[in-house]
Amino acid sequence: MTGNLSTDNPIALRQGALSGHGIAYVPRCLVYNDLIEGDLIDLFSDQVGKKLGIYAVYPFTRQPPKKVRLLIEHIRNKYLAIQHCF
């Protein structure tokens, strides 16, 4: 099969790159292990992609419910534990 692959699915782009079908611009966290294991290489290591944040959206109250605070803290801790992947 020949031709171009175009998709907005980063998992499909990753798989295409792993299969040797070209280059892919995907979030580093998606390919971090592939880069570490040498299955993929970073062609533009001096370029920095977009830095995106993670936001919790909930109804405004002076004091969010405890379960909301605990969920936010849990997500924050998990994110900080893997921040090297970003």
Image: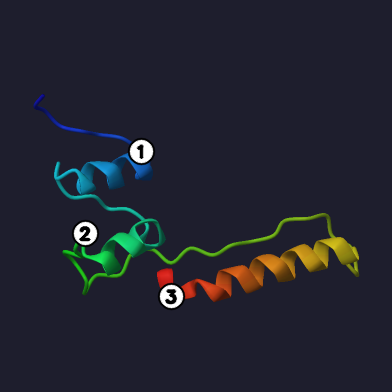
Disc 2/disc 1 C-alpha distance (Å): 20 Å
Residue 20 pos. (x, y %): 14, 45
Q: Residue tagged by mark 2?
A: 40
Q: Looking at the image, which residue is at 9% across and 27% down?
A: 2
Query: Where in the figure is residue 69, as x and y percent of width and height?
Result: 81, 68
Decide if residue 54 is on the left or right side of residue 67: left
Quadrant location, the N terminus = top left
Q: Which is in the foreground here, disc 3 or disc 1?
A: 3
Identify residue for label 1.
Answer: 8
Q: Is residue 30 visible?
A: yes
Say which quadrant the C terminus sits in.
bottom left
Q: Are marks 3 and 1 in contact (CB under 8 Å)?
A: no
**Residue 45, quarter of the rendered image:** bottom left
Tag shown at residue 23:
none
**Precedes in sequence: disc 2 or disc 1:** 1
**Disc 1: CA contacts within 10 A as few (<14), some (14-19) or many (>=20):** few
Q: In terms of image quadrants, where is residue 34? A: bottom left
In the displayed structure image, the side of residue 83 where residue 63 appears, left or right: right
Considering every residue shown, the one lying at the far left of the view is 2
Q: Earlier in the sequence, mark 3 or mark 1?
A: 1
- Residue name at image x 19 percent, y 43 percent: 19
Label 2, secondary structure: give it. loop
Mark on residue 84?
3
